[in-house]
Amino acid sequence: MHQRLTLPQLEAFLKLDETASFRDAALEFGVSQPAFSRTIQQIEARVGVRLFDRDTRHVRLTTAGERLRPIAVRLLKEYEDSFSDFEAYVGGRAGRVRVATLPSVAATLLPAVIRRFRQTHPGVTVEIWEDVGAPVHRVVEDGEADIGIAPPPAENRGLNFQPIFQDRLVLACRSDDVLAEKERHNWTVFRERPFVAMSTDTGLRSLIDSAFEAADVVVEPLFNCKQPATVGALVAASQGISVLTRLTLEQIRVPELTWREIEPPVASRSIGLVTCPARSMMSPARDFMRDVVLEARAFAID
């Protein structure tokens, strides 16, 4: 089997075809004419066939050379294109950022983040995977996501956590409810109205139950809902009031609903960036995290 030509040899072959002159090709290649001639001889010895017919006045491709020319052009173009793609990836101009996050974060913080990020990284694709906290932690740990946006992971997972937002519990009621006339309410207000709750198998319900316990308030839910959107729909239908986090209430975006602060004890869940310290992160992912932090700060001020 003949040995394959190297990329510099393919370049030399095409340069001689282009210039049809050993002298001119050697000048453009930056070598002496004898050295360039030896390169062409080595190329022909490797492929086992003559590639150029030459005399004292002309240099032209043989039939075998004509057959090799499109192959050499294609190989060099593929090489150049491949490394251009790689350089774009290393430089943050191409690639993808995989984000695992809570649905409430995906619906509230991420749209503005993605709009800003795509303006500065038009060649980078953003993939979003939505789930609750523990599954988000798992995909980051397994390398299926570059970034997680969720509550803190368990310490034994060995993941990094950077808090960016305190997602506090708020009162959810209709905009025309008398409760909307005050800026904040005591936890005891939930004793006086039908209470629409999240179901007991949700992480949000655990947070809400802990808040009621801290406030020494016992409430019997009228409804137990699996999805926050159902809670919002029932409250909008005047079937009661509820407690949701600020992000969750923004996520469901029911026009008839509003929220009001709840007096201490204040309850909230920490939302932050979850990353795996054992995996390197490319610059687009770091830039995306920076934009998430900026958006979270702006949202906290609203």
Image: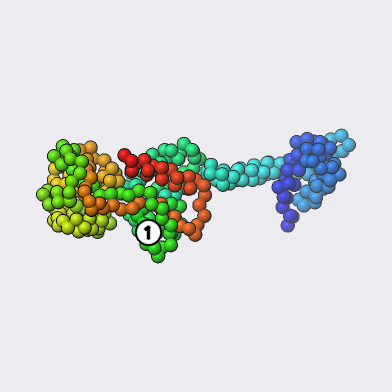
What's the residue type where badge 1 is placed?
Pro
Q: Where is residue 208 in the image (x, y as percent from the top left)?
A: 23, 54
Given residues 238 and 217, the one toward you in this image is 217
Is 209 situated left or right of 93 in this image? left
- For image coordinates 13% across by 39% down, the residue present is 178
Picture quadrant where residue 201 is located: bottom left
Given residues 261 and 195, the one toward you in this image is 261
- For image coordinates 35% across by 58% down, the residue present is 134
Q: Where is residue 144 in the image (x, y as percent from the top left)?
A: 44, 55
Kindly give the residue lying farthest to the front in the view shown. 264
Secondary structure of residue under mark 1: loop
Quarter holding the C terminus is top left
- For image coordinates 39% across by 57% down, the residue present is 137
In the displayed structure, 142 sits above or below 172; it is: below
- For image coordinates 26% across by 40% down, the residue present is 253
Q: Position of residue 41 (x, y in %)?
A: 82, 48
**How many residues crowd mark 1 within 10 Å: few (<14), some (14–19), many (20+)?**
some
User: Can residue 259 be seen in the rendering of this structure?
Assistant: yes
Q: Where is residue 259 in the image (x, y as percent from the top left)?
A: 22, 42
User: Can residue 16 be seen in the rendering of this structure?
Assistant: no
Quarter holding the N terminus is bottom right
Given residues 275 and 19, the one toward you in this image is 275
Check disc 1 and report the residue beneath it.
153
